Image (spheres, rainbow, N blue to C red):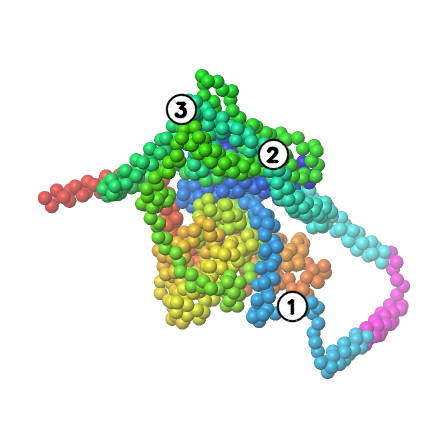
Amino acid sequence: MSNSTYNKMWAEAQEGLNNLLQTETEDKSPKPLKDHPIVFQMLATFYVKYVQIFHNLETAYDQIVHPQKRLVIRQVLEGVMGRILELKNEMVELENSEFHYFDDILQDQKLCPEHIEIPIPRYFIKEKLKVLKEREKILAQILVNAGLQDIEPKKHIKVMTFEEAIRIIQISERARQGRLRAEFMKQIYLEEKRERQARLHSGKSPNLDASAVCIQKVWRGYIQMKRTEKIREEEMIFLGMSPPPHFHRISASLMQAQRVEAMRCEVQEKHEEEYKKALVAIKNRLREMEGPDIKESLQEQIRQWFIECRHITGKFPDYPDEEDGGSIVIFSQKTPEQVAAELAAKEEELQKKSKDKGKKGKKEKEKKKKGKEKGKEKQEKKANEEKEGWKMAPSNFLPIMEEGNNWYKVLLVPIYCTLPTSFATSPQYILLPYKIDVWQHREEGWNFHQEYDPELVKEEKRKEVKEEIRVQVDELMRQELKNLKLAVDREKDKKKRSGKKKKKKGTKDGKKKKSKKEKDLTPDRTIDSLYKELVEGGLLIKPKTVKLSDYVGEYSYLGTTLRQVDIEPMPSLADVRQLIALYGILPLGSQALHEKSPLVKALLLAGPAGVGKKMLVHALCTETGANLFNLSASNIAGKYPGKSGLQMLLNMVFKVAKQLQPSVVWIGNTEKTFYKKVPKAEKEMEPKRLKKNLPKILKSLKAEDRVLIVGTTTRPFDADLRPFCKVYKKIILIPRPDYASRFALWKHIILQNGGSLSKSPTISCLAKMSDGFTQGHIIYAAQTILSERRIRQLNRKPLTAVELMGALARQDPVYKEEEDMFKAWYAKTPLGKARAKALMEGEEPGKAKGKGKDKRKKKGEKKGKKK
């Protein structure tokens, strides 16, 4: 696609975002909303629209080659991603469920489920591709040196002895002679057969008519069969039940599009380098050409301010401090009298503060008491607000999106100027905003190659140059003001009494708060040496190259309908894929997003064996370029023994994880860490080593640390629930695949393993018969049947459903009892309890009130009897 296509895509996304921002600002009603279905409908509509904008912006950012446009898109894109995460958090808190269904909204807006799939931004990997490749080389080299990975030879040549070579030659020669002998014997047998048949039919004359009829019958039957097959194929293609013949061929236009995308990436890098060089060159040129004029005009304006202040107040003013903004205060929309009054008021405040410091000690105790009372009042208010209704939480990303949206439409360039003055009126030094159309209506006919725009660079760098010159001018004008005061008013520079040192923000009485920092147990060691030790110890492993899109699963189309009938639907695999993208990939991929979005420190993936928990962990690392640390109980058994050894291990792991972020710390079979009772067979392994340390580690992780702890478990009901849920506050329950997901899985896996979708293995039949089996079972069955020998026979002997079902039947499925155990366990988690409570309150609001009144009556009767 061309540059204009992506520009249109960007413009459409910005238009949609502008409308959304307007509706969001208009819908901020001060009154809380009580009707939960209406609130959820509003949040879900916003969510779906933001995801559509996210799709367009991500594609535009990846393909647009103009460096300045990409800066604007990047800011808006991160704002949109953050807002999606905030809306998801609001929906979770509202409905007390991690899974949400938008069937009715998709139907109203005429959208497909693919339109609300969370895309993975490609710049997560593209921007640090070189770093990731270098890290892979280092990791591979360490593994080879440690003997943990074999060097793969360039050519697969087997070295053999002289005797083995002679034996192979003999075997092949004997086989050749045997084949020739068999062919010779076959020819002798056929000749003898012909002679015998000739003796039998020697007396009879051949019936030519009967022979012709027989040949015609066979030929006509064959031709009709082929015609029928062709008509049936055409009909199925017409109905959309079968793919057309060119469907499986590699499209020439698709190949061309991929080549164009690769070329655009190269052009992007080239334009980016040119833009970076231009930033430095244009700034230097502006400093040389316009710097002297800016300096002179600023000095003249400040001198004029001195004279006017002297004329009105009778004395020269005090020059504003650098902390207060320096000469920026002078150029604000204020008269000299107002500026002088503000400076005088600040001096008075400083003097009052120095006098009132002694009185503060007595009042602190009273304030503490009042603070406690206020805290209680606030808690009561929050409880009342919850009873009253729902209110939208403040957003960290709406201002970012508004700023990016304004930057797309109009750029405000400040210009210093003075209004005309007279002796009757005082002068005003103001900043006049001058509007420039940046991208919305910008004419770009001259910029066909989409290189950087020098005029915009000048406007941007002119501000920086002005600020630098302003600081220099402030120093000169302060000295000039001193000289003027000495010469005209004969005043000496009065040194301000500082008294005590200024308090630092966030501290009491200027004393620093002692922050408890974790002791670094390896202060003398480099990150490279720690990295090497962790790799050699098997604690830092190489993730498999798996994309999130490889986790195949279909959308659930009946979620909203089932919830309306008060039936809780089982989540689909597409919903699980969405949650991994929202809670794991997006925050780990972007630093700005991780710092400002709702923080997720630990994530638990629970489900039966074979549903793809480990695959999702590896997909997290692949999509974000994260390091993978393995702290499973079986992996750390016997390593770094004792309490001090465990502290050293955790210190090393999290020091490297924070330094080389993003990082994923994986704890496989994490229920073992929280065992209620350790089995005798596992006591030597010490599975509960990390139980006490995990909560401390989570507290030490801050918003700046892109480190995610991911636990996987097949038996969560074996763990002690309370400490388990304290560590893993986000729990994703992964079910066995439903019919739609199994249908897509069979298709994908058969093609992936070299099979072909012929008419014989009916996919719908396989999907129906494999109910209860997981993705792991289906993959094992396909790989078992589709061996190299079987793939070569596919042309002569098509694949049948019986073969695949035979391999599948040898495995144990996930029975309903096991699935019910997972459901019952999830119902005991905090979110599950909250969901059940909300459903009960919704169903029986009248009954609950009646019960409360009955209890009060009974209590009153009991008290009366006692009296």
Residue 83 appears in the rendering:
yes
Q: Relative to the observer, which residue lies in front, 507 or 562?
A: 507
Q: Kindly identify which residue carries mark 2.
A: 290
Going by the numbered disc 2, the residue's amino acid type is Glu
| Residue contact at pointers 1 and 2, CB within 8 angstroms | no
Q: Is residue 206 magenta?
A: yes
Tell me which label, 2 or 3, sits earlier in the chain.
Answer: 2
To which quarter of the image does residue 203 belong?
Answer: bottom right
Residue 358 placement: quadrant: top left
Residue type beneath disc 1: Glu
What amino acid is labelled 3 in the image?
Gly
- Residue drawn 70% across and 33% down? 446
Secondary structure under the numbered disc 2 in the rendered image? loop
Q: Secondary structure at mark 1?
A: loop
The answer to which of marks 1 and 2 sits earlier in the sequence is 1
Label 1, residues with CA under 10 Å away: few <14, some 14-19, many ≥20: few
Q: Magenta residues, as a range?
A: 181-210
Give coordinates of residue 653: x percent, y percent.
47, 61
Q: For mark 1, what is the residue?
A: 152
Dominant secondary-structure state across the stretch colored magenta: helix
Q: Is residue 210 above or below residue 75?
A: below
Q: Residue at x 55, y 33 (%)?
A: 295
